[in-house]
Amino acid sequence: MCLYTFSPPDGPKLPSVSVSPSAEIVEGSSVTLTCSSDANPAANYTWYKENVDKPLSEGPQLVFSSIQSSDSGQYYCAAENKLGRNTSQYKFIDVKYAPKVGPLSLTPTGEIRENSRVTLTCSSDANPAATYTWYKDGKPLYKNTQIVFSSIQSSDSGRYYCKAENKLGRRTSKSIFIDVKYGPKLPSVSVSPSAEIVEGSSVTLTCSSDANPAATYTWLKSNVKLRPPIEEQQLVLTSIQSSHSGQYTCRARNSLGPNTSKPISIQVKYGPKITSVSVSPSGDIMEGSSVNLTCSSDANPAANYTWYKENEDSPKASGQIFTITDVRPEHSGNYYCEAQNRRGRQNSTLNLIVVAGNSTTIMHIIWPTVVVLMLIALLLLSLWGVGLNSGRRKL
């Protein structure tokens, strides 16, 4: 006696979908979806993906030999035999993958000017979502999807990139260079040589200013442009003269504006020149009077003065003014002053002539003359009085 089970013909029951491996699905791995349904006769299987019009494949299994992030989605299968058709519930496939970093975004585009608002954005496709770290010139800054410069400065110029990271890996973006444009910072002026400037030497003034784009330079003396104009970073005075002394500034300019340096003083040192001697009072110098001899000279640093009389070894006096009181005939002669500083010396000579006589002698000459004139005047008055009297008698 033989026993057997008879299954009546039937359409497919609700299919079920299983996934292998059942753990987390990582991009690049092999994944198999299996559809099964109780059916008699045995069912045929067709695979579908949500929002995809055409079927993916036929057969009880859907195999991804190297699954990609684009394969994520809702899958289902249909079981069908001649007695009917049935579809499974959706099975969600969530493919995990390391970040895929896109290009950095910079807002605004075009020229970036100092003090403007600038935003750098890093983005990536990742599952799970990535965290971001920003770098400038290879040094880490902070973690965020964006860097926002509310008022960008010249010091913010540099090369930036970001790293996106999740548990499956890390990816680095291409770098972007931020070139902040700005007008000239306060220019500075240096002088070479930096020691004492001596007449006839060569002196170079150099102007420098931080600017982007690079600045052009113009030189001024006492706030007036030099003639002819000097529009170079350096002002070279090959044989400097005393006339070059003064206040110099340089003006730096680019497309974003000008800026002018603080003045720098150039003081040319030179020995005495144009030395001269004057006498006061001018004219004849009378015996017994007082006389001032004054010496002047153009010199830097200021000259010291020493007075000499010709054929005398010892100096007569020092200082710019030499005063002789109660002048005597023996004071006549050639006097010269020597103007001297550490750069040199120069002399100037004056011939002093003293007129003989004094105030007492002059009075001895003047008073007799005055007495004679007074006597003559009295005689004339007497004669005039006699003439008047004789005229009255005749009347």
Image (cartoon, rainbow, N blue to C red):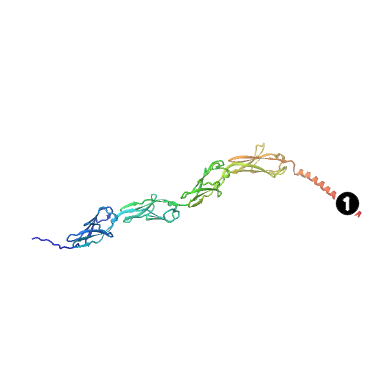
Residue drawn at the location 29% of the way across and 55% of the way down: 70
Residue 344 in view (yes/no): yes
Seen from this angle, which residue lies furthest right?
A: 394
Front one among 220 and 331: 220
Front one among 24 and 328: 24
Q: Position of residue 113 (x, y in %)?
A: 45, 53
Front one among 129 and 376: 129
Q: Is residue 58 left or right of residue 326?
A: left
Seen from this angle, which residue lies furthest left?
A: 1
Mark 1, residue position = 387
Q: Quadrant of the N terminus?
A: bottom left
User: Measured along the vertical axis of the image, is residue 344 above or below residue 120?
Assistant: above
User: Measured along the vertical axis of the image, is residue 78 above or below residue 219?
Assistant: below
Q: Looking at the rendering, which quadrant does residue 16 occupy? A: bottom left
Q: Secondary structure at mark 1?
A: helix
Q: Residues within 10 Å of mark 1 (few under 14, many from 20)?
A: few
Q: Quadrant of the C terminus?
A: bottom right
Q: Tally the numbered discs.
A: 1
Q: Looking at the rendering, which quadrant does residue 86 occupy? A: bottom left
Q: Is residue 358 left or right of residue 377?
A: left
Residue 13 in view (yes/no): no
Q: Position of residue 232 (x, y in %)?
A: 51, 46
Identify residue type, mark 1.
Answer: Gly
Q: Position of residue 71 (x, y in %)?
A: 28, 56
Q: Position of residue 94 (x, y in %)?
A: 28, 57
